[in-house]
Structure formats: C-alpha cells, structure tokens
C-alpha cells in the first residue's frame, strides 16, 4: 500500500478528515521549509504539499505567486527541494509528501531523472498543474515506474464525461478544485463544492479532497463535512509573507492556524460519529 | 507525386491534439480545458459557415482597409543592388499593424459565442490597441493586461487604449513585461471563463490559439501570393518577416509553405548580440519547454525558469515563440536568423529616408535581414518582406536612443 493510501485508510478508520497543507519550497528559505514541514505535521497536518517554484505560476493568485518569487530569489531549484524532502523523511517516515508545480522545470530536468530523484528523496506523488489528462500519459507512466503517484485535478468546469476520464487515470487522491479561479480566491460556493465532490464519488473510490479558497477553521470544517479532506495553501503562505523579518513569529502563526483548522475539522468528524 | 504529398503536409498542421510535431498542445490547468475545447468547437463551426466568413471579410475590407498593397521598394532595392524587394504593407491597416487582422477575427468569434467581455495581453501595446479598437466597435467590455514596465515604456499606447474605452490593468508580477501580462490574462480568464473571451495576440498559447491566430493572419500571405503572381508572373524567391510570437511571420508564410521554391526567413530579436544573453531569440538559442499552454522553444535557465529577454522593440520582447515556428525550424522548412538592436535601428533610419515609409522597430528587424539577403541575390530574384507595422509608436524610443528629447 502506498504511503498516501495508508494515510487515508488510517484516517478513515479514525473517522478523521485529511488536512493537507501547502507551502512553497524555499519560501522564505529552505531552512524554514525544513522546520515548517515538521511543525505542520505536529500541529495536525496529515499530508504535505510542497510547491515547486516556477517563474510563471499561471494558476496561482497573488499570495502564492509572491511565494514563488521569494523562493526563486533564493535560487531554489529541484535538487535542493529533493534534499529538503530527504531530510524530512529521515525523521518522518509516514507523512506523505506531494510536489505541486508546473511542467517546465520537470521537463527541463528530464522526466526520468526527476522521477528517480524524487522517489529516492521520499516524495510520494506529483501534481503538475499544467498537465491535464490529455498530456499526462507520458509523465505518469514514467512516474509510476518509480513509485510516484500522479494527482489529478477536477474543476467546476469539468464535464461529467471529463470527470469520468480524469478519475480513470487518477492515483492517490482526487483534488477537487473548489472554484473557477486561481489559488487564494474567495468566491467559494458550498453547494457547488458538494455536488462536484458527489459527482466524483459516484465514479471513483479514491479519496476526494477539496482545495482553493479554504482559508480557516470554518471553511475547512464545512468543506471537510462533504469531502475526505481539504487543502489549505494561501492562508498558510500568507502567515509567512506577513512575518518575513520574524521567522519565529511566522512559525508560531502557522502552527496556530494549522491547529485551529485541525480542531475545526475534528469537531465535525466527532459530530458525524455521534450521529 | 510523392514530393507533393510530403510538401502539402507543411500546411496540414496542427493534428487533432493541437500538436505541430512535438510542439504545441494544451498545457493548461483543468479549469481551462473545457473553455478551450468550446472555443475549438465554435471556431470549427463558424469558420465553415459562409455567413461568418462573409462578415469577417466585410470587416477586413471596410474596417481594417484590406487588401493592403504589395509595394515595390525600388529605391531601396537599387541602393542594395541585389534582389528586388516588395513590402507587404500591413502598416497601412487600421491601427497601424497586422495585429488588427487577428483581433477582428477573434472579437467576431467572441460576439458569436455570446461573450460580453474581452481581455487581452499586450507588450508594446499594439495588440492591446487593436483589441480595444474592435471592442469599442462591437460594444464589448474590454480589459487589457500590460506589464508595469511596458506601461512606462509605451505611455502613448496606454492612453490610446483608455481613449477607446478599455481598462488597462498594470501587471506587477514576475518580470512585469509581456509574459507576465499573459499569465495575468490567463488567470483572469480562469476566473471569468463564462462571460469572457481571451483574445490572444500572437500564435502562442494553448490549442486552438496558435491555429486560430494563424488562420486569421493568413490573409496576409493569401493576398501577397495573388499580388506577386499578378506583378511578376511567378512566386517570390524568398519571404522575410520578424518573429516575436510569430503571428505576422506565419501569416505571410503559411499560404506559401507548400511551395518548395519559396525560401523563408524568420527574424528574431538579436538584442545586444546572442553571445551576451541579452536578446529575445528562443529559436536561435533557446531550448524546448512548456510555457503559456504550449510546448515550444523557450529562453530558460538550466533549472527550467523562464528568462528575462531584451530587445529594443517591445513587440519582440518575448521568451517563447509560436509552436508552429518551433516545428518549421526543426523540419528545416523555415530558417530562423537574428537582427541586433543596432542593425534594426540602422534599417529603421535607412528605409525611412529612402522609401518615405517609417517601419515599426519590430519590422525594422525584418528589414535589416532583408538587406543582407538581397545583397546575396540578383535582380532577377524577388523578396517579399512583411512590413508588419508603422513606426509612429516607436518615435519616442528612437529619439531616446539618439539622445533627443521630443
Ligand atoms: C508591428 C509589429 N510587428 C511584429 C510584432 C511581433 O509580433 P508577431 O511576431 O506575433 O507578429 C508586433 C508585436 O507587437 C508588432 O507590433
């Protein structure tokens, strides 16, 4: 069983929803990324998503764009990100790590070289935003050879027919995008999120997590009541952006945000159990 | 017979996945895929409808001012003393460049698809002006995304767009130039995909844009082909055009691609010289990669980050290039060369003086290479150069370089 499958089955057996936290590797420094990965797990994160910085992050809103720029100003590249993951893995053998980014840095390194290094470092899965199902076959085949899962997105604009094709290729979990927009947008519509998750569930047994627009305990609680988990990105990255000169305060703020979200989500899981 | 089949393959691209060989494609986030498939469907439907095409022709004739002349540059040809040179006068179009051919086509599509708002990216401002212009005429809401740096460099065009009723959005991310404006336009489109049509200004972006923009710009080559046959009774020996994203170049080249006797030269911005790294010549010194929804040659670092570019001409200042050009380069059908800032400036001065036609600085890159090419040919040979735009917009840049205040 893959680390991701195991994590979701453990969560299910405890009647808990997955909290997935996102930061950009190297924002504001690689040392901070190292520290934050462990801190977020301690505060309640179940899976970690690491953004791979890219000069042209087309699907990101302003908060995460700025994080990509900060990481790039530190010249952070894939090789160093693999080192960060390796060092995380020495202490934490169970928390899945997903790399999320854009195709070009991977393509430049070479898909096979990337997959080998990522797998050696202890990466579990890759989400490449600009590789939709029509373009994913090549990389997902190579990634699979190295035991890396390919995470796919379902969007509010995906037709029933497309959702069908997406879930047939999906691995690990399905990432359901909550809104037609970029990361950090706010116009989240609960009913739309719910019906999208239900459409996916009808077609797939994989866990369905929801991301984009989930920013606090309240949204996480509500959204996780209709899904297998949530992804929180911009809200965490914003904690870092607001305390660039005081890293220890930034870490404290991330810790309290993640714990608060965890508590919110566990509250709902508890309610459901009582039902 | 065999060669015919092979040759005609040049104009048969892209394939149904939007690929030109390994280039092109649709590398976008899932949210945009359905919008792009819809666009492809609508485009296929409308472009096969006589009524739509008649309306487009009508606009091209009465609004844009087509056909544009094919002008023989006699004094310049004599001065060079080689091949005879013809200018395809896209500078005489409404708004002063070839960009309007495409803007008119896409805006008509937008209208037919029931969209009420158009957005566009712009670098020099020419495509922004063209889009704002047609939006005004069709009564569409219009927002233009432009890098903060370019807004400062191109104040006049920014004001033109505002006069036309468009809102100009200053883009402050990344390098704050054209590529970032394109990212921001994509982000806006992701957010408002229901009521908004994204008018891309060159043959880049995800499928179907490179095909659709090429088709709208191909009117240049179709006209030129008829005009040159009429004037000299045969096809030209060579075609020359500048390449930013590559829309004016493909517009001229495409209808000639299957004519084996016609050589073609795409001229990239050599900036301060390829060896300095300060240029915008991905086909000459880039590596294939993925940006803005397609696979093509890119100026990028070893880590796959997109690099800043440099050119004296804002319209060529782009780190990528249309995927069809990437393919035409690899199969050897078109040769891609460079002109430096300095060579382009010299050609700008010379052609302005000797022909009384002031080229855009983008166009001046094509002219600079044409001069070299013509020198090596004789007076029985003929070159058509795409005179993609007029130079009025660049007067301030030229004056600045000369140290003159205007
Ligand atoms: C006059 C003119 N020529 C050429 C270009 C370059 O674009 P493309 O390569 O798409 O023709 C521009 C772009 O702004 C332009 O304004």
Image (cartoon, helix red, strand yellow):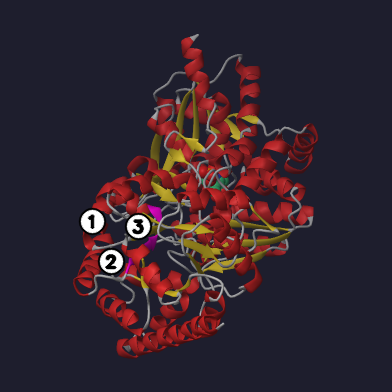
Measure the alpha-carbon separation of dots 3 and 2. Answer: 10 Å
Name the chain under label 1: A
Q: Residue at x 31, y 64 (%)?
A: A3
Residue A3 lies in the magenta-colored region: no
Q: Which residue is mark 2?
A: A75
Say above or below: B51 vs B318: above
- Local secondary structure at mark 2: loop
Q: Is mark 2 within 8 Å of ligand 1?
A: no
Most foreground residue, B398 or B174: B174
Check contact, mark 1 vs mark 3: CB within 8 A.
Answer: no
Q: How many circles with numbers are drawn on the protein? A: 3
The residue lying toward the viewer, choosing from B31 and A243, is B31
Q: Residue A5 location in percent, x, y? A: 37, 63
Q: Residues within 10 Å of mark 3 (few under 14, many from 20)?
A: many
Q: Is residue B174 above or below residue A167?
A: below
Label 3 belongs to which residue? B305
Confirm whether circles 1 and 2 share one chain. yes
Mark linked to residue A117: 1
Determine which quarter of the picture holds residue A43.
Answer: bottom left
């Amino acid at each position: 069983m893959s680390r991701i499958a195991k994590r979701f089955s453990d969560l299910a057996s405890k009647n808990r929803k997955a909290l997935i936290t996102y930061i950009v590797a190297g924002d504001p420094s690689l040392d901070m990324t190292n520290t934050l990965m462990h801190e977020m797990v301690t505060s309640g994160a179940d899976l970690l998503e690491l953004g791979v910085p890219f000069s042209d992050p087309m699907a990101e809103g302003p908060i995460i764009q700025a994080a990509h720029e900060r990481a790039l100003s530190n010249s952070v590249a894939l090789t160093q990100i693999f080192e960060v993951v390796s060092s995380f893995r020495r202490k934490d053998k169970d928390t899945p790590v997903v790399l999320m980014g854009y195709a070009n840095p991977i393509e430049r390194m070479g898909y096979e070289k990337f997959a080998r290094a990522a797998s050696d470092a202890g990466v579990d899965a890759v989400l490449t935003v600009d590789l939709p199902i029509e373009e994913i076959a090549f990389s997902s085949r190579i990634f699979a050879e190295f035991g890396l899962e390919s995470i796919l997105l379902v969007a509010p604009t995906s037709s029933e027919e497309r959702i069908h094709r997406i879930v047939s290729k999906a691995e690990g979990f399905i990432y359901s995008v909550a809104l037609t927009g970029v990361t950090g947008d706010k116009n989240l519509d609960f009913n739309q999120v719910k019906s999208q998750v239900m459409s996916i569930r009808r077609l797939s047994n994989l866990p369905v997590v929801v991301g984009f627009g989930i920013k606090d305990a309240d949204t996480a609680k509500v959204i996780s009541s209709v899904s297998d988990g949530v992804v929180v990105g911009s809200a965490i990255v914003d904690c870092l952006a607001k305390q660039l000169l005081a890293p220890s305060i930034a870490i404290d703020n991330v810790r309290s945000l993640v714990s608060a979200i965890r508590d919110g989500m566990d509250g709902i899981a508890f309610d459901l159990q009582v039902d | 017979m065999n060669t015919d089949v092979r040759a005609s393959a040049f104009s048969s691209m892209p394939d149904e996945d939007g690929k030109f060989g390994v280039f092109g494609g649709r590398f976008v986030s899932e949210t945009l895929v359905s919008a792009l498939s819809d666009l492809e469907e609508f485009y296929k439907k409308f472009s096969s409808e006589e009524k739509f095409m008649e309306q487009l022709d009508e606009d091209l004739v009465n609004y844009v001012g087509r056909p544009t002349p094919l002008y023989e540059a006699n004094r310049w040809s004599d001065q060079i003393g080689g091949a005879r040179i013809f200018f395809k006068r896209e500078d005489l179009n409404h708004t002063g460049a070839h960009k309007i051919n495409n803007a008119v086509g896409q805006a008509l599509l937008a209208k037919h698809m029931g969209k009420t708002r158009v957005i566009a990216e712009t670098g020099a401002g020419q495509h922004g002006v063209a889009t704002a212009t047609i939006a005004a005429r069709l009564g569409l809401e219009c927002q233009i995304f432009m890098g903060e740096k370019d807004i400062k460099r191109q104040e006049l065009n920014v004001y033109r767009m505002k006069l036309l009723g468009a809102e100009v959005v200053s883009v402050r991310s990344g390098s704050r130039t054209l590529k970032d404006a394109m990212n921001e336009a994509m982000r806006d489109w992701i957010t408002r995909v229901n009521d908004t049509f994204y008018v891309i200004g060159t043959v880049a972006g995800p499928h179907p844009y490179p095909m659709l923009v090429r088709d709208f710009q191909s009117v240049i080559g179709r006209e030129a082909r008829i005009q040159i046959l009429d004037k000299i009774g045969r096809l030209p020996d060579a075609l020359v055009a500048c390449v930013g994203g590559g829309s004016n170049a493909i517009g001229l080249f495409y209808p000639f691609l299957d004519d084996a006797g016609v050589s073609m030269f795409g001229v990239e911005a050599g900036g301060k010289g390829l060896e300095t790294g300060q240029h915008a010549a991905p086909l000459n010194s880039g590596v294939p990669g993925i940006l803005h929804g397609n696979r093509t040659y890119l100026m990028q670092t070893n880590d796959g980050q997109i690099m800043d570019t440099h050119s004296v001409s804002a319209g060529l200042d782009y780190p990528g290039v249309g995927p069809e050009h990437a393919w035409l380069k690899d199969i050897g059908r078109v040769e891609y060369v460079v002109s430096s800032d300095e060579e382009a400036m010299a050609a700008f001065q010379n052609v302005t003086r000797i022909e009384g036609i002031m080229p855009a600085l983008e166009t001046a890159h094509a002219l600079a290479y044409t001069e070299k090419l013509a020198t090596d040919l004789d007076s029985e040979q003929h070159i058509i150069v795409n005179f993609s735009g007029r130079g009025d917009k660049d007067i301030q840049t030229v004056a600045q370089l000369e140290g003159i205040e205007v």
